[in-house]
Image (spheres, rainbow, N blue to C red):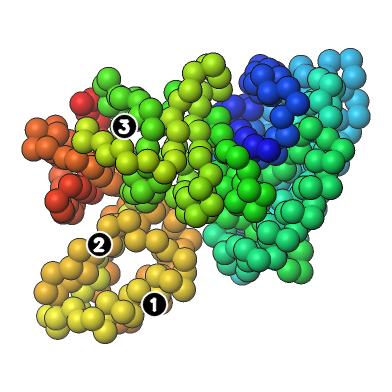
Amino acid sequence: MQVFKFGGASIKDSEAVCNMSEILKRFPGEKILIVVSAMGKTTNALEEILHLRLNSLSTTTAIRTLFQYHQSIVTKLFKENEAAVSHLLEEIFHELNAQLSDIKKTRYDESYDSIISFGEIISSSILLHYLQKEGFTISKIDAKDCIKTDESFRDALVNWETTKDLINKTTQAEFHKNQLVITQGFLGGTADGKITTLGREGSDFSAAIFASCLHAKAVTIWKDVPGILNGDPKKIKDAVLYQELSYQEAAEMTYYGASVIHPKTIKPLANAGIPMHVRSFSSPEKGGTIIHECETVHQIPCIIIKERQSLITFKLNDFTFITEALIGKIFEALNKHHIKINMMQNTAISFSICVNDDLHRLDQLMKELEDDFSIRYNTGLELATIKNFNENLIDSITAGQEIYMDQRSRKNYQVVIKSLEFRY
């Protein structure tokens, strides 16, 4: 049994969905659990709809546009037999409107999960019916009923013991009847049935959870890139494809912000010894990159760009030194508001952190600490990390840039800048 994950780009329109079906036909008789993201940019659209609703603005146009986007896919996929799926789509959007009417501003994170989850609910429903039409024996399971989490909405923690029992009980029964089982990525559920999410772009992690619990022989992430490269090909000229990576190398790359794989994905796969393939959905005949237990150590530079960053500096107005106790207070607040540090640096009288731009959580953080610290911040920045750096590469990145913060270790160099507009 294998686990396949199809991201938003790989199911963004009717042509992409047809291509997904063709990929699955390359594995006749293989038991495959399919994890899907929301289609295209649906998650972004739902975030905008939630923003409009929370600010008491009309959501009518945005919802209509999102509905029409999915309806056009349904029309092209099902042609004259679209009525049943169109009716299902209407029912899902009716429920979305009902959920929006019940939104509570004081519970932003919980509201976020309840609304954003509709992207995966829609995509898994459409794909189930299309793959059935294509002749596959397939059923759908709801991830919220299998992956059990705490109530840390927007970045929920998995209850692994309960999750393993539920996944095995639910999926094994379905695989007795079907070749394929489809479910939603990104989603989980609390013990009392509330929907949670596993962190932005968390569908990769969902695939790893299912694979680990089911002892799958492999996970394949189908992407719009040929595999894992040593840099973003849009910014790095002649980016190099890694044929293989060790679990450790892959974990480090995701930690520093490599967007091809979600950061939490590697650990459960490494612990279970399950290899992960990252392959191109437009060239499925190519092998892509395999992540597994190996001794390979790459010396070529790897450039990782993490966009939408904020730099926050804490200091005391009376020139008191920044002590472990004061840093501990900052860390306690960061943990409380589920904010991950991507880079940090301290001087005698200040402590600076680079974190993801999440204005809602950062606003809560600064309100909590504003009585204890003088706080300065910059938004709209980028964090560049170079593994196996050399001085020429550092010069290429920093030339003409205002450097907000930088640091280096034996193999890694990190710098916070306004934007990276070079091609190496």
- Ranked by sequence position, the earlier of labels 3 and 2 is 3
259 relative to 78, above or below: below
Q: Nearer the viewer, mark 3 or mark 2?
A: 3
Of mark 1 and mark 2, the one earlier in the sequence is 1
Which label is found at residue 280?
none
Q: Nearer the viewer, residue 25 or 182?
A: 25
Depth order, front residue of 322/376:
322
Q: In which image quadrant can residue 376 be found?
A: bottom left
Quarter in which the C terminus is drawn? top left
Look at the numbered disc 1 and give the secondary structure of its residue. Answer: helix
Number of the front mark, 3 or 1: 3
Q: Could you tell me how far apart the alpha carbons at marks 1 and 2 are, in whole angstroms? A: 15 Å
Q: Which residue position is annotated with label 2? A: 344
* Viewer-closest of 163 and 398: 163
How many residues crowd mark 2 within 10 Å: few (<14), some (14–19), many (20+)?
A: some
The residue shown at (49%, 18%) is: 286
Judge from the rendering whether residue 325 lies leftward or rightward of residue 99; answer left or right: left
The residue wearing badge 3 is: 231
The answer to whether residue 264 is visible is no
Residue type highlighted by circle 1 = Glu
What amino acid type should be assigned to the residue bearing mark 2?
Met
Instruction: State the quadrant of the N terminus.
Output: top right
Which residue is identified by label 1? 332
What element does badge 2 sit on?
strand
The CA distance from mark 3 to mark 1 is: 34 Å
Residue type (three-letter) at the residue carrying disc 3: Gly
